[in-house]
Amino acid sequence: QVQLVESGGGSVQAGGSLTLSCEASEYIYRPNCVGWFRQAPGKEREYVAAIYTGFATTRYSDSVKGRFTISQNNDKNTVYLQMASLRPEDTAVYYCAADKEPHKGYCDDSFRYYADHNYWGQGTQVTVFS
């Protein structure tokens, strides 16, 4: 069964922190590319970060590098997104995604740029107020 379940969203003051969780069904968890995207109202979906669960290698967008950390817990088939120094412009629905083609060895550009190449979670709202 293919399943991605996000949790941990909420409202936080600018400068604060939140941690999102994405629990994946074992079939798609590893080794695979699992990551986070976000979409703000009226804007296109934006890539945030990804981790290849086989090697724990990570990638980040420039907009979150140094503030967000993606990590994994193999015992729980869960990927986390620790968000710090949050800004109002981080407000969005955050989606967890996993590559439909596991075992690639890394997170490739198809994961980042082609939505139909991924499985998607239902999303969790993050609101940052000033």
Image (cartoon, rainbow, N blue to C red):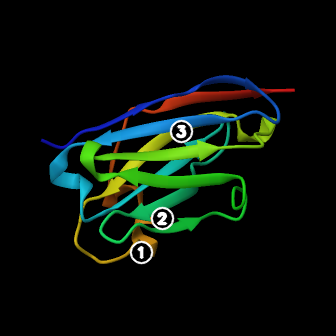
Do the numbered discs 3 and 1 sit on residues whose CB atoms are within 8 Å?
A: no
The x, y position of residue 36, in whole percent, is: 49, 50
Q: Nearer the viewer, residue 21 or 62?
A: 21
In this view, 27 is above or below 91: below
Q: Earlier in the sequence, mark 2 or mark 3?
A: 3
Q: Using the numbered discs, state the Cα–Cα distance from disc 2 to disc 1 in whole angstroms.
A: 7 Å
Callout 1 crowding tier (Cα within 10 Å): few <14, some 14–19, many ≥20:
some
In the displayed image of the protein, which residue is found farthest to the bottom?
105
Q: Secondary structure at mark 2?
A: helix
- Residue that appears at 71% across and 53% down: 67
The residue singled out by tag 2 in the image is 112
Kind of residue sitting beneath label 1: Asp
Do the numbered discs 2 and 1 sit on residues whose CB atoms are within 8 Å?
A: yes
- Residue that appears at 62% across and 34% down: 18
In the displayed image of the protein, which residue is found farthest to the left?
1
In this view, 20 is above or below 71: above
The x, y position of residue 13, in whole percent, is: 79, 25
- Residue that appears at 82% across and 32% down: 14
Q: Earlier in the sequence, mark 3 or mark 1?
A: 3
The residue singled out by tag 3 in the image is 94
**Which part of the image, by quadrant, shows the C terminus?**
top right
Q: In the image, which disc is placed on residue 108?
A: 1
The x, y position of residue 74, in whole percent, is: 29, 52
Query: Which corner quadrant of the image does residue 59 belong to?
Result: bottom right
In this picture, residue 4 sits left or right of residue 41: left
In this view, 37 is above or below 42: below
In this picture, residue 80 sits left or right of residue 84: left
Callout 3 crowding tier (Cα within 10 Å): few <14, some 14–19, many ≥20:
many
